[in-house]
Image (cartoon, rainbow, N blue to C red):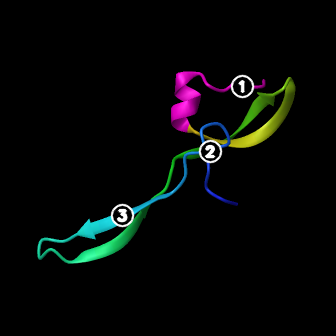
Amino acid sequence: MARKCTVCGKGTQMGNIISHSNIKTRRRWKSNLQRIRILDKGVPRRAYVCTKCIKSGKVDRAI
């Protein structure tokens, strides 16, 4: 599974850990995805959605 939000497309970001001695090591920031039931064109289905989209109300949750 690709770690991407189905609503906004937010995914994994890359960057560096920088130590006190200024050594750079690659690291990843993973998006906080939750598998929830959403309404997609009136049909309930399960999807991976980031918590930012859930909190802002961009998603219609199916109950």
Front position in the image: 12 or 44: 12
Instruction: Name the mark on residue 61.
Output: 1
Q: Position of residue 40 (x, y in %)?
A: 80, 30
Label 3 or label 2, whichever comes before in sequence order: 2
Looking at the picture, does residue 2 appear above or below residue 58?
below
**Quarter of the image containing the N terminus?**
bottom right
Choose mark 3 or mark 1, whichever is in front. Answer: 3
Q: Quadrant of residue 2?
A: bottom right
What residue would you read off at disc 2? 5
Q: Which residues are magenta?
A: 51-63
Mark 3 burial class by Cα count in 10 Å: few <14, some 14-19, many 20+: few
How far apart in space, not on screen, are marks 3 and 1 (Cα)?
33 Å
Q: Residue placed at 55% from the left, 52% from the top?
A: 11
How far apart in space, not on screen, are marks 3 and 2 (Cα)?
20 Å
Element assignment for label 2: loop
Element assignment for label 1: loop
Give the tally of numbered discs: 3
Q: Is residue 40 left or right of residue 6?
A: right
Looking at the picture, does residue 40 appear above or below residue 4?
above
Q: Residue placed at 52% from the left, 46% from the top?
A: 32
Instruction: Name the mark on residue 10.
Output: none
Q: Position of residue 19 (x, y in %)?
A: 18, 71
